[in-house]
Image (spheres, grey):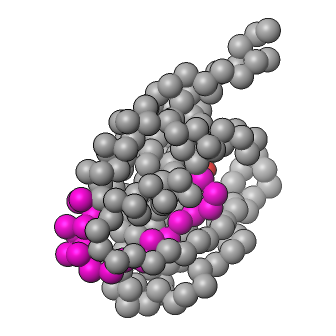
Amino acid sequence: MKERVEVMISADAISKRLEEMAEQIYEDFGGEQVELVCVLKGAVMTLTELSKRLKMPVTMSFMDVSSYGNGTESTGKIKILRDLDEDISGKNVLLIEDIIDSGRTLSHLRDLLLKREPKAFKICTLLDKPDRRVAEVPVDYVGFTIPDAFVVGYGLDYAQRYRNLNYVGVLHFDEE
Ligand code: IMP
Ligand code: MG
């Protein structure tokens, strides 16, 4: 099987969309300082590219989570592999994700972070695949809503590869 990536969202389109989102985020937080919380590893590129476009003061922190479960059936519970190194209570927080698929990870992460009583809490994702949603979770900023396909690039991986692509593409497996 040969892997082939078909462009779905160009680098230009992503750049333009992030510009719009950054403006909206700036307005919604009233120009106040925001703590950007990045979920490793997929959201790294969105975090860096979005942050360059935000005009208010920002701080950054990183979390790494994995889902519990026996492989085939995920309980949806998450295990924290790396927690934030700062307390977020009383802070404006923007959680940044690469893609929302079933919504399970994000839903648990949201509950967990809200318990720490941030001043404001909003969620931003580059991509949304609503067709596969199992757990409803309110998302404040969506870059692009996409159909149910396996995509890579702009932080998203297949077997840890393709994260460095500056566009988002559908991964195809062709017969050789
Ligand atoms: P969920 O919303 O809890 O199902 O988990 C979403 C996570 O699954 C994302 O953060 C990605 O790491 C991964 N994921 C879901 N769909 C894709 C895809 O199309 N390409 C690459 N990773 C994906
Ligand atoms: Mg992820």
Asked if one can make out residue 129 in the rendered structure from this viewpoint, the answer is yes
* Residue for point 43% across, 49% down: 126
User: Would residue 144 be found to the left or right of residue 60 on screen?
Assistant: left
46 lies above or below 107: above
Q: Residue furthest top?
A: 176
Q: Measuring from the top left, give residue 48's x and y in whole percent.
A: 49, 59
From the viewer's side, name the closer residue of 27 and 81.
27
Span of residues in magenta? 23-42
Q: Residue at x 54, y 44 (%)?
A: 154
Q: Residue 63: which quarter of the image?
A: bottom right
> What residue is at 57 percent from the left and 34 percent from the top?
151
Q: Is residue 117 visible?
A: no
> Image check: 147 left or right of 138?
right
Residue 134, percent from left and from top: 51, 49
On whether residue 176 falls in the magenta region, the answer is no
Q: Position of residue 96 (x, y in %)?
A: 47, 62
Q: Quadrant of the N terminus?
A: top right
Q: Residue 11 or 124: which is nearer the viewer?
A: 11
The residue drawn where x is 75% and y is 59% is 69
Residue 121 left/right relative to 115: left
User: Which is more toward the observer, 28 or 15?
Assistant: 15
Where 136 falls versus 26 (above or below)?
above
Q: Quadrant of the C terminus?
A: top right
Reply above or below: 120 against 95: below
The picture places residue 8, in percent across and down from the top left corner, at 46, 27
**Residue 171, located in which quarter of the rendered image?**
top right
